[in-house]
Amino acid sequence: MVEFRARWSTLAAGIDAATPADRDRAVDALRAFAILGVVLGHWLVTALTARDGGLSTTSPLAHMPWLAPVSWVFQTLSVFFLVGGHVAARGYASARERGLSYGAWAGQRLGRLFRPVAAVLVLWTVVAVGMLIGGAEFATVRSLVKLVLSPLWFLLVFAALTAATPLVARLSPLWPLAVVAAVDVWRFGLAGPEWIGWVNVAAGWLVPFTLGSAWSRGAFARRDRALLLLGAGVLATAALILWGGYPASMVGVPGAAVSNLNPPTLAAAAFGLAQCGLALLVRDPLARAMRRPTAWAKVALVNLSAMTVFLWHQTAMMAVTALGLLVSADLPGLHTVPDSVGWIAARLLWLPVFAAALSLCWAAFRIHEQATGRPRPSRTARTAAVPRPRTAPAEEISHV
């Protein structure tokens, strides 16, 4: 153990020393928090129950509605979009200053997002076909594949907003927020068609994305604006839940008439405002915490493999659940119905096992997230460019 700590301290010191002095470590910390929040949230609120030798999907939120506040902690996508908008706006401005074309800049950003996706799709295509040929129930295969593919909608939306950065970077967050409100009024108040709600898939996540862009321009240099954002978001969310008829859970619940997440509702957007306000308020404490080499090294390593962790965390959980079927009895917290406090306690004990399985997936597939090259500057920029030494690994932390 002493030797391990010594090696870890050495590694952390190396990462800390290799990190550029002007890097905003708080931004990376917020991104890591958002990714890990999504992972832990899925592991806690998604359950695969054993039924006639197969698996079906359910959620403890469907059986224990009083657990809804758990979703307030672990539904952290707004923070991810906030950071994404901030980094995209700064990155595009920097690319223009360095003479990079829009295509080169967008190719680098989107390539980092989608390279790891190919590995997931190929593996699960093989697994799904193999299960069906082997006699697995179609409902079981569908449940598993749905869990794997459902998070990919987030990547598609994030990629679209990132690609549209030159168009939306200076858009006021009030405009997409107004669209979300109008869609909800039409959908719920005027009995409009259900499909209109999917407009909010873009508008809803554009709210935190444009907040991030405003952050990059210094809009939240003063803490009072972040406090206003937090307070307004909390009050609006509470009002919409208590008197507006919106569900308390900020994630989808099987069997519920309305989901705040699929597609995003005004309640989800208001909750996102509160989350973003809180994230902006904790920037300074996070920046101080990230001065410690060991704390920064953990955040840096998470960011280096953020997409790998996100894409494979459901596979890790399902692999453990499937292997558990080899045991003759249903394992508590893994195959049993999530309808009691006992299930919660048992589930918490499974989290380290899920994490171990995810670490194996990370070791096998993280190579797909490594950058294969950097965008080439324009001819003019190449002529004026000054050669520079190869950057340290810490500088390659994901900026998607």
Image (tube, rainbow, N blue to C red):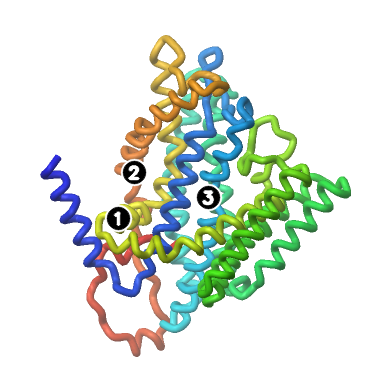
Q: What's the amino acid at mark 3?
A: Thr
Sequence-wise, the earlier of marks 1 and 2 is 1
- Residue at 64%, 45% (x, y): give it: 261
- CA gap, disc 1 to disc 2? 20 Å
Sequence-wise, the earlier of marks 2 and 3 is 3
Q: Position of residue 170 (x, y in %)?
A: 61, 75
**Of labels 1 and 2, the one closer to you:** 1
- CA gap, disc 3 to disc 1? 21 Å
- CA gap, disc 2 to disc 3? 22 Å
Going by the image, does 374 lie left or right of 276? left
- Residue at 41%, 88% (x, y): give it: 380
Within 10 Å of disc 1 (Cα), the crowding (few <14, some 14-19, many 20+) is some
Residue furthest to the right in view is 190
Mark number, residue 76: 3
> Is any atom of residue 163 visible in this view?
no
User: In the rendered image of this protein, does residue 106 appear above or below residue 269?
Assistant: below
Which residue is nearer to you in this view: 119 or 359? 359
User: In the rendered image of this protein, does residue 168 appear above or below residue 383?
Assistant: above
**Of labels 2 and 3, the one closer to you:** 3
Q: What secondary structure is marked by label 2?
A: helix
Residue furthest to the left in view is 3
Q: Position of residue 205 (x, y in %)?
A: 62, 57
Please say if the residues under marks 1 and 2 sit with CB atoms less than 8 Å apart.
no
Mark number, residue 362: 2
Quarter that holds the C terminus? bottom left
- Residue at 29%, 73% (x, y): give it: 21
Mark number, residue 295: 1
Going by the image, does 242 lie left or right of 280? right
Going by the image, does 119 lie left or right of 240? left
Q: What's the amino acid at mark 2?
A: Trp
